[in-house]
Image: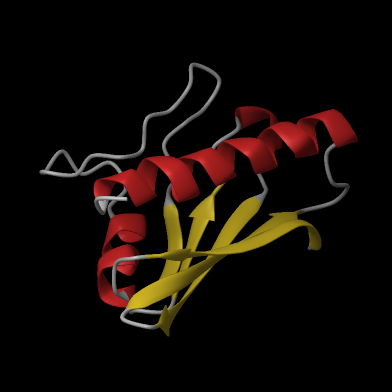
Amino acid sequence: MIEYGNRANSLPAPPSVVWQDLVEPRSHGARPWLRLLSDELPPRVIESEKPSRVVWSSLWPTRANDQIVFEVSPENGGSVLRFRLLAVGDPPDGSKTGHIRKRLNHLLFADLRFTYGQ
């Protein structure tokens, strides 16, 4: 697999909460956060290791074999969430790579973050 994206940022929630939100991203509870666009599909959890790792299938049908790897680690009462984008075969072109990175940044570090009160 070829890595074509990698980003980390802090979140105010502890690792166990962030991990749970990644394992059940479409939860309809008090904090729904995964709002997909018309060209995106809900992810499947391919593997998980509580509370530090979750691997999703791709959200994009045009990149169906790609994976999104999440690593969650503790930091000052909150978490650091890192995502890595992995391609099976060739990575997407620059335009598609930019779109995917931007969407994940928004989903994780805006939409998910807002559910934690920030």
Residue 47 seen in this snapshot: yes
Residue 93 seen in this snapshot: no
Residue 76 rendering spot, x and y as whole percentages: 38, 83
Residue at (60, 33) in percent of width and height: 60
Give left or right: position of 77 versus 86. left
Residue at (39, 40) in percent of width and height: 111
Residue at (88, 47) in percent of width and height: 90
Q: Quadrant of residue 104?
A: top right
Residue at (58, 36) in percent of width and height: 103
Residue 99 rendering spot, x and y as whole percentages: 70, 32
Q: Is residue 29 above or below residue 95?
A: below
Q: Is residue 32 above or below residue 86?
A: above
Give left or right: position of 109 versus 64. left
Give left or right: position of 6 versus 114. right
Residue 57 rendering spot, x and y as whole percentages: 53, 49
Give left or right: position of 62 versus 56. right
Q: Nearer the viewer, residue 108 or 22?
A: 108
Q: Quadrant of the N terminus?
A: bottom right
